C-alpha cells in the first residue's frame, strides 16, 4: 500500500511539471503569433534599419541598397522596389515601407533587401514585423585595400583621383587610399603625366600595396612614302597635336593609345615604350607604276604582260587583289584578273578576229588604296602565210625553192666576169697600139 502511494506521488511529481511546461510553450507561441499577426496585417508600416559590412564586420561606405516589399494586391500594384540609397561612412541606411492592402488574406509579409558593392550583390530576406532592429548585410569576401601611390623618386602623388575597379577615390596628401574591395583581381588606374598607369592587384584579405610609377620618353615622326615630313593630327591618349610629330619627355604609361590622322587616312600605332621609344608613321601618297606593257599573240590567245612597282622606299607595295585588266572588243567589255608570272603580271584572253581593234585598261592599287591606270590598243592584223610543208620519210620538211633566184645570181656573175675580162683586154690592146705608133 505504501509502495503504491509513493509511486503515485512520484508520478504526480514528474507529470505535472511536464504539463505546465507544455502549456507555457503553447501560450508563448500563441503570444508570439498574436504579436506577429498584429504587426503584419493589412496596411502595415515600419522603418527598416540596414547596415552593410565587410568580411571583418567593418562598415562599407558607398554600397547601393534597395528594398522590395508588397505594396498591395487588390489594386494590382503588387511588389514595389524602393529607390536606390547609398550607405554612408557608418555603412547604414534606413528605409520606410508601407503596405496599403485592405484584405488580410492578400497580405504578403516577405521583404527582400539587396545591397550591391564593387560588382557583387548580397541579398537578405526578412518578414515584416518579425526581424532584428538592425538588418546586417555582410560581404563575406570584402577586405580593405590600402594603396600608397608614389612617383619614380618615391614621393607621394597627392590629391589624384584613382580608379579602383569601377570606384573612384582621391589620394591623400601622403598619396594614400584606403578602400574596401571584393576579393580577386582588382584593376587600378592612376592618371599621371601624359598617360594612365594601370596595374592589377590580387586581393585575398586585407592588403597594403605600394604603386610606384615609371616614366618613358616617347617620340613620333609622321612622313610620306618618300620620307618627307607630313603635318598631321596626332592623338596620344587624351592629348592632341597638329604637327609633323610629337615628343614627350616623360610618359607614365608604357602602352599609350596613339593614332595619326592625315586627311581621310587614319592609322593607329602599337606602342610599347618599355621596348622602344622612337616610332615613325608613314602615309603612302604615291600611286604604283605600271610599266613594260607587252602583247604576245599565238594562234588562239593574246597574252598581255606588264610590271607594277611602288617606287618609294616607304611605299606600301602593290596589291594584286586590287589589280584588274578590262578590255573591250567590238563594244563588249570584260574584266580579267591577272596572275603573277616571273615578277610580272599576265592576262590571257581569246584572240579576237582579224582586223579587230582591242582596247584595254590596266587598273592597279597599292596596299593603302592609291590607284593608277594605263590604257592601250592593239590591232589584230593578218599573219604572214608560212611556207608550204610536205611529208618526206615521216618527217616534215621545207622544200627547196626551184631556179629563180639562183639562176639569176649565176647570170649576173657571168656578166660581171665578162665585163672585167673585156675591160682588161681593152686596156692591153690600147697599150699595144700606143707602142706601135
Image: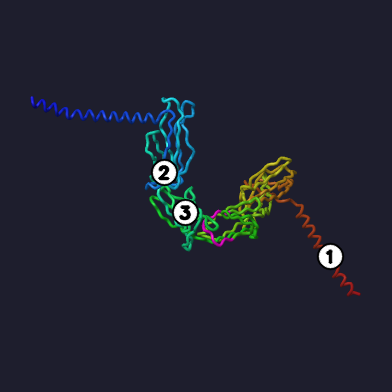
Instruction: Check residue 140 for magenta coloring.
Output: no
Q: Nearer the viewer, residue 74 or 170?
A: 74
| Residue 259 visible within the image | yes
The spot of residue 201 in percent (x, y) is 43, 52
Q: Secondary structure at mark 1?
A: helix
Residue in the image at 78% along x and 60% along y = 413
Which residue bears the numbered disc 2?
Answer: 52
Q: Which residues are magenta?
A: 247-258
Q: Disc 3 designates what residue?
A: 199
Q: Are marks 2 and 3 in contact (CB under 8 Å)?
A: no
Task: Kindly report which numbered mark, 3 or 1, lies closer to the viewer in this rendering.
Answer: 3
Up the image or down, 132 lies above or below 430; here it is above
Q: Can you say whether 231 is above or below 136 in the image? A: below
Q: Position of residue 361 (x, y in %)?
A: 70, 47
Q: Earlier in the sequence, mark 2 or mark 1?
A: 2
Judging by the rendered image, the residue that carries numbered circle 1 is 422
Mark with earlier residue (2, 3): 2
Say which residue appears at 43% left-offset and 43% top-offset: 92
Task: State how far apart marks 2 and 3 are (Cα).
Answer: 28 Å
Q: Is residue 384 visible?
A: no
Q: Earlier in the sequence, mark 3 or mark 1?
A: 3
> Looking at this view, is 252 or 436 the one in front?
252
Question: Which of 80 and 241 lies nearest the eye of the viewer?
Answer: 80
Q: Residues within 10 Å of mark 1 (few under 14, many from 20)?
A: few
In the shown orientation, is residue 58 left or right of residue 269? left
Mark 3, Cα crowd under 10 Å, few <14 / some 14-19 / many 20+, is few
Front: mark 2 or 3: 2
Amino acid at each position: 500500500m505504501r509502495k503504491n502511494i509513493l509511486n503515485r506521488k512520484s508520478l504526480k511529481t514528474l507529470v505535472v511539471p511536464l504539463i505546465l511546461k507544455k502549456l507555457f510553450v503553447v501560450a508563448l507561441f500563441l503570444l508570439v503569433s498574436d504579436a506577429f499577426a498584429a504587426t503584419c496585417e493589412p496596411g502595415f508600416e515600419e522603418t527598416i534599419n540596414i547596415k552593410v559590412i565587410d568580411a571583418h564586420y567593418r562598415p562599407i561606405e558607398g554600397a547601393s541598397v534597395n528594398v522590395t516589399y508588397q505594396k498591395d494586391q487588390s489594386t494590382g500594384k503588387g511588389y514595389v522596389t524602393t529607390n536606390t540609397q547609398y550607405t554612408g561612412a557608418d555603412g547604414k541606411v534606413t528605409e520606410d515601407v508601407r503596405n496599403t492592402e485592405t484584405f488580410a488574406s492578400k497580405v504578403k509579409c516577405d521583404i527582400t533587401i539587396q545591397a550591391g558593392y564593387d560588382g557583387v550583390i548580397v541579398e537578405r530576406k526578412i518578414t515584416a514585423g518579425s526581424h532584428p532592429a538592425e538588418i546586417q548585410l555582410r560581404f563575406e569576401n570584402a577586405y580593405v585595400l590600402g594603396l600608397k601611390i608614389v612617383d619614380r623618386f618615391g614621393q607621394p602623388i597627392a590629391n589624384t583621383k584613382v580608379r579602383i575597379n569601377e570606384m573612384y577615390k582621391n589620394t591623400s596628401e601622403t598619396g594614400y587610399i584606403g578602400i574596401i574591395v571584393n576579393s580577386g583581381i582588382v584593376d587600378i588606374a592612376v592618371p599621371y603625366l601624359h598617360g594612365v598607369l594601370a596595374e592589377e592587384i590580387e586581393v585575398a584579405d586585407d592588403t597594403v600595396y605600394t604603386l610606384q610609377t615609371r616614366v618613358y620618353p616617347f617620340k613620333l615622326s609622321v612622313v610620306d612614302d618618300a620620307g618627307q615630313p607630313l603635318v598631321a593630327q596626332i592623338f596620344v591618349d587624351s592629348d592632341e597635336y597638329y604637327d609633323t610629330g610629337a615628343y614627350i619627355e616623360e610618359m607614365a604609361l608604357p602602352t599609350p593609345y596613339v593614332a595619326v590622322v592625315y586627311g581621310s587616312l587614319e592609322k593607329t600605332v602599337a606602342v610599347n615604350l618599355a621596348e622602344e621609344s622612337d616610332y615613325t608613321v608613314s602615309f603612302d601618297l604615291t600611286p604604283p607604276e605600271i610599266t613594260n606593257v607587252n602583247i604576245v599573240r599565238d594562234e588562239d590567245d593574246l597574252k598581255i604582260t606588264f610590271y607594277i612597282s611602288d617606287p618609294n622606299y616607304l611605299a606600301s607595295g602593290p596589291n594584286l587583289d586590287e589589280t584588274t585588266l578590262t578590255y573591250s572588243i567590238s563594244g563588249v567589255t570584260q574584266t580579267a584578273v591577272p596572275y603573277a608570272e616571273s615578277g610580272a603580271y599576265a592576262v590571257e584572253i581569246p584572240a579576237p578576229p582579224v582586223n579587230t581593234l582591242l582596247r584595254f585598261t590596266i587598273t592597279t592599287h597599292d596596299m593603302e588604296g592609291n590607284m593608277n591606270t594605263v590604257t592601250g590598243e592593239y590591232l589584230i592584223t593578218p599573219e604572214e602565210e608560212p611556207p608550204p610543208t610536205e611529208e618526206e620519210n615521216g618527217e616534215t620538211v621545207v622544200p627547196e625553192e626551184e631556179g629563180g633566184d639562183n639562176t639569176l645570181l649565176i647570170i649576173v656573175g657571168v656578166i660581171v666576169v665578162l665585163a672585167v675580162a673585156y675591160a682588161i683586154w681593152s686596156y692591153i690592146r690600147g697599150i699595144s697600139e700606143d707602142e706601135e705608133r
